[in-house]
Image (cartoon, rainbow, N blue to C red):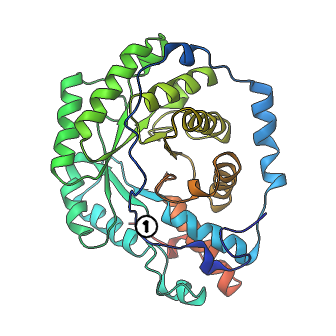
Amino acid sequence: MEDLAVKSTAASAVETAGVGHNWPRNDGIELDLSWVVDQRVNLSAAERRVATLPGRRTVKKDAQAAWLLKAVTCIDLTTLNGDDTNERVKRLCAKARQPVRQDILEALGMGNRGITTGAVCVYHRFVSTAVEALEGSGIPVAAVSTGFPAGLVPHDVKLKEIEASVADGAREIDIVITREHVLTGNWQALYDEMRDFRAACGDAHVKAILATGDLKTLRNVARASLVCMMAGADFIKTSTGKEGVNATLLVTLVMLRMIRAYQERTGLKVGYKPAGGISAAKDVLNYQFLMKDELGREWLEPDLFRVGASSLLADIERQLEHHVSGAYSALNRHPIG
């Protein structure tokens, strides 16, 4: 499999640091119900596709280091815990600025590349703290809004929370949809809700969290993905990380094919974000391989690909240290916040 740019060189993986949001916004289109209800998923074919992925796609040594460095730049470094504090958020922001130890980067020939994570993701309460801690870094702050994670607060409260996060400096908003609209097939209600969220975000980019583990079927995942994109989502995201089942390769395949179908019909590029349960370097590689296979090289960049994670970064840094030193270190030597 070809490497990200030049074969077998880690330095080729990271062309630019920071997130520019340089692609055109997805302004959305009119709701096309016939297109939505026409969606079907061939479950057995989809299962075969993802089951064979690890065996058909693999990278080693310098190539693996290159892919993992690219993954670092696509991480939304996240803390969404009930015991979050300002100090924890500040530590997380410091890690986002320097996600991989400098000695490891120097050994990889990447010491001067300014590698950062794609964003820092926090609750609204900590948006201003994160914005201040990241000042001058170019790293955007993403806020989870709309009654995260259940999304069952009143609609006007959801809109006010989005507006408050944007006012505090959030450049990205991760919203949660009302799952009931999907489970009851009320696609117009889902579209209208998403349009309102998109408008409330203003210039901030909006990621629509589908909570796929709650949607019951892959057909519902496909339809909800399409409706949210029609309504103007800049990204579609699998999960809050709080559901019983979060990101999977099977759900990812379905969502990526909806992104491809939407681009083919509209010419608009929508990003993708798996979240929840991706904690090992070997796992994120499979997501990257699937992204490249299904959507192409552009979807390996942080403008169109994010991974919602926290402990994943520690394992990537550990694998990179092993690559340059030949020895594994304890995970507690790679704190994330």
Left/right of residue 229 with respect to residue 172 in the rendered view: right
In the rendered image, residue 71, in percent from the top left (x then y), is placed at 56, 63
In the rendered image, residue 124, in percent from the top left (x then y), is placed at 23, 46
- Residue denoted by label 1: 336
Determine the residue positioned at 67% across, 19% down. Answer: 40
Q: Is residue 328 above or below residue 195?
A: below
User: How many marks do you count on the picture?
Assistant: 1
Element at label 1: loop
Q: For this rendering, which residue is in front, 132 or 207?
A: 207
Left/right of residue 22 with respect to residue 55 in the rendered view: left
Q: For this rendering, which residue is in front, 245 or 67?
A: 67
Q: For this rendering, which residue is in front, 325 or 2?
A: 2
In the rendered image, residue 112, in percent from the top left (x then y), is placed at 46, 87
Determine the residue positioned at 64% across, 67% down. Answer: 67
Left/right of residue 125 with respect to residue 82 in the rendered view: left
Q: For this rendering, which residue is in front, 23 or 140?
A: 23
In the rendered image, residue 64, in percent from the top left (x then y), is placed at 70, 70
Left/right of residue 260 with respect to residue 128 in the rendered view: right
Residue 159 quadrant:
top left
Determine the residue positioned at 57% across, 71% down. Answer: 69
Where does the C terminus fall, quadrant-wise? Answer: bottom left
